[in-house]
Amino acid sequence: MGKQGDKLTSESSITAEDIQNRLATLGDIRVKKMFGGYGVFEEDKMFALIDSSGRVFFKVGETNQAKFEEAGSEKHARMPYFSVPEKVLGDDDLFEEWARLSIRISKGGT
């Protein structure tokens, strides 16, 4: 998601389609346009967002926030979402591992 008033870009749309395809094996992954970007959901729980520039952010909690901070990730505004590092985006297994944890956190897990 971008900020209110941001315009949806081709970068965010391409990223949303890519993320939905890459994570399809994890469940019912859906993307929804929101504020110039996208929210990414599994079973109606948002676990990731894509901002208007196409950057991917995963939801964080007690069990994964330090991992994101150590990797140099940036927090998305005041929301509990941190940018996904390039090395994670480039590794399908690692990307799925980080996504699984964010999905669990979105459902109230730690």
Image (tube, rainbow, N blue to C red):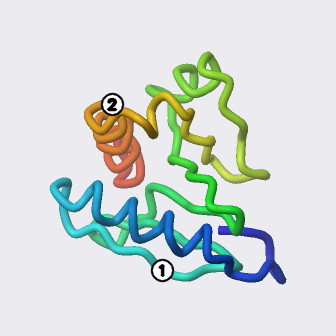
Q: Which residue is painted at 42% across and 36% down in the image?
A: 90
Quarter of the rendering containing residue 74: top right
Q: Which residue is painted at 68% across and 77% down in the image?
A: 9
- Tell me the kind of residue under disc 2: Leu
Cα–Cα span, label 2 and label 1: 24 Å
Q: Which residue extends farthest top?
A: 70
Quarter of the figure with the N terminus = bottom right
Disc 2 to disc 1: CB gap under 8 Å: no
- Tell me the kind of residue under disc 1: Lys
Q: Specify whether 1 is left or right of 65.
A: right
Closest to the observer: 68 or 109? Answer: 68
Q: Local crowd at mark 1 within 10 Å, few (<14), some, or many (≥20)?
A: some
Q: Which residue is painted at 62% across and 42% down in the image?
A: 83
Q: Relative to residue 80, is residue 42 depicted above or below?
A: below
Q: Position of residue 85 (x, y in %)?
A: 56, 33
Q: Position of residue 88 (x, y in %)?
A: 45, 32
Q: Which residue is mark 1?
A: 32
Q: Local crowd at mark 2 within 10 Å, few (<14), some, or many (≥20)?
A: few
Q: Specify whether 76 is left or right of 12.
A: right
Q: Position of residue 46 (x, y in %)?
A: 45, 64
Secondary structure under tag 2 reads helix
Q: Which residue is mark 2?
A: 94
Quarter of the rendering containing residue 34: bottom right
Q: How many marks?
A: 2
Q: Relative to residue 98, is residue 58 depicted above or below?
A: below
Q: Which mark is residue 80?
A: none
Secondary structure under tag 1 reads strand
Q: Which residue is painted at 71% across and 41% down in the image?
A: 75
